[in-house]
Image (spheres, rainbow, N blue to C red):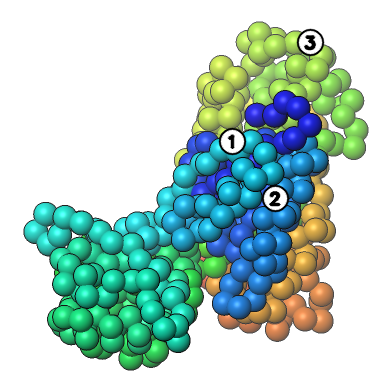
Amino acid sequence: MKPSGNKGKVYLIGAGPGDPGLITLKGKECIEHADTIIYDYLAAPALLSHASPGAETIYVGKKGGDHTLSQEGINALIVEKASQGKTVARLKGGDPFIFGRGGEEVQELIEAGIPYEIVPGVTSAIAAPAYAGIPLTHRHFTSSVSIITGHEDPLKQESNIDWPLISKSTSTLVFLMGVKNLPRISEQLIRHGKAKETPVAIIQWGTTSKQKSVQGTLETIVKIAEEGKIKSPSVIVVGEVVSLKDKMKWFENRPLFGKRIVVTRAREQASDLLVRLNQLGAECIECPTIKVVPPEEPHLIKHAIEQIDSYSWIIFTSVNGVKFFFNALFELNLDVRVLGHLKTASIGPATAAALLNFGIKSDIIPESYQAESIIDAFRHHKMDGVKVLLPRAADARMILPVELRKMGAEVEEVKTYRTEIVQNSAETLLKSLEEQTVDLITFTSSSTVTNFKNLIPEKRFLDLMRGVTIACIGPVTADTARNSGLDVHIVSDTFTIPGLCEAIKNYYT
């Protein structure tokens, strides 16, 4: 994507309506390769996570009279950055050519002789109604749609909108940026012939976890919007298709819709939990309290691997244990063939699946996903004098090696990884708790609880946690949370990420 010559290139990208999942594949690719990203108020901040580590990001948002930079200033900035030979991703909410002033920016690029490409985006005019359950066309209602600016100055002498034409039309009418002018829009449509009983819906922050929608008629919608405290950014839909909304709405019906949930899991492991909670409707605040790092004495696991022929069993207690064990194995220029004589046990299906990725099927997977269950499973095996390798976390519970030794096993514990506190999550965490915008906090291990507690000022802990629901992945994590002074409301029966999400869903439904 790197342009040739002295001048850079600008990609004018439609960022979509708010849901970061609605960015196009090409839009994402442009963000990934950009030297500079210039983004708007309505461009989802999560999209910046696709940027390369060294990319420059510049916010130029404009909202309700509060302009970070004028349009002329934005045009000049884009030209300046591209003239420096940079690849520029100009990230605009919705679609850049639908009331996005993208045409003006392109004209400036043409004038400056700078190469450019247009990457269309999903416009809120289509997406917000779809997320509210409103099909803009329907064979029994209408076969056409009109997209209209709602941002016209109500004091100007002449309108660019042909009110008589659109009022008599059977098209679905979609007004963008029209909440402030809602009284004028309703009044003009009724004055020029639109029935006052015509259904109207307004969708605020469409496609995001803050989505809120109200509906009424041209006669009642102004009062309903005022009572519902509807503000910008919002999309107004006028037409008979609005009558389908109650039956077809889906986005706002999801069980965790509107809930703000803090995810404390290590960032590299959080994706599954984030995806599942988002699918259930939650807005996730990613605040990892731990990061997983190699052990302080990495030579110990390598030494154990060099003596691998002396072991009969190897027990993996976590996905991280599997990952770091095999990293050490491969660093010694060995592969899974040296493990062929071993029997294996895994705590939990995720750990067993991680092991299977290396071609090894677990001989023991206990029904319950904690150390006590694997101990019960070993009671069916003769362990007297059997040598067991236990690669696991530096701060793991002692119950497993203690109980195996009681059975006569020779257990060698080897620290394959450790967890460290993540300090840079503190600011985001404290701000959310202070603003009382957190509904629930998830804990997936005892270390996430301990480090979370260390991030919160002790004197403010009780006040900040008041009214916040706590969800833990199992009884061990829950006990750690209680011992740390937290009230635990949700404990999953199945100690897995899907089990935790199911428990949270059941709690709220």
Q: Residue furthest top?
A: 337
What residue is shown with label 2?
A: 78
What residue is shown with label 1?
A: 29
- Nearer mark to the viewer, of 2 and 1: 2
**Residue nearer the viewer, 263 or 351:** 263
Image quadrant assignment for residue 62: bottom right
Horizontal side of 143 relative to 487 (left or right) equals left
Image quadrant assignment for residue 240: bottom left
Amino acid at the residue labelled 2: Ile
Q: How far across and how far down the image is residue 418, in percent?
A: 80, 42
SS state under label 1: helix
Q: How far across and how far down the image is residue 141, in percent?
A: 12, 62
Identify the residue at horizontal 43%, vertical 50% (top origin).
122
- Nearer mark to the viewer, of 2 and 3: 2
Identify the residue at horizontal 77%, vertical 48% (top origin).
80
What residue is shown with label 3?
A: 333
Return the disc, 2 or 1, that comes first in the chain's sequence. 1
Q: Are marks 2 and 3 in contact (CB under 8 Å)?
A: no
Return the disc, 2 or 3, that comes first in the chain's sequence. 2
Vertically, is 152 above or below 260?
below
- Nearer mark to the viewer, of 1 and 3: 1
Amino acid at the residue labelled 3: Asn
The disc at residue 72 is none
Amino acid at the residue labelled 1: Glu
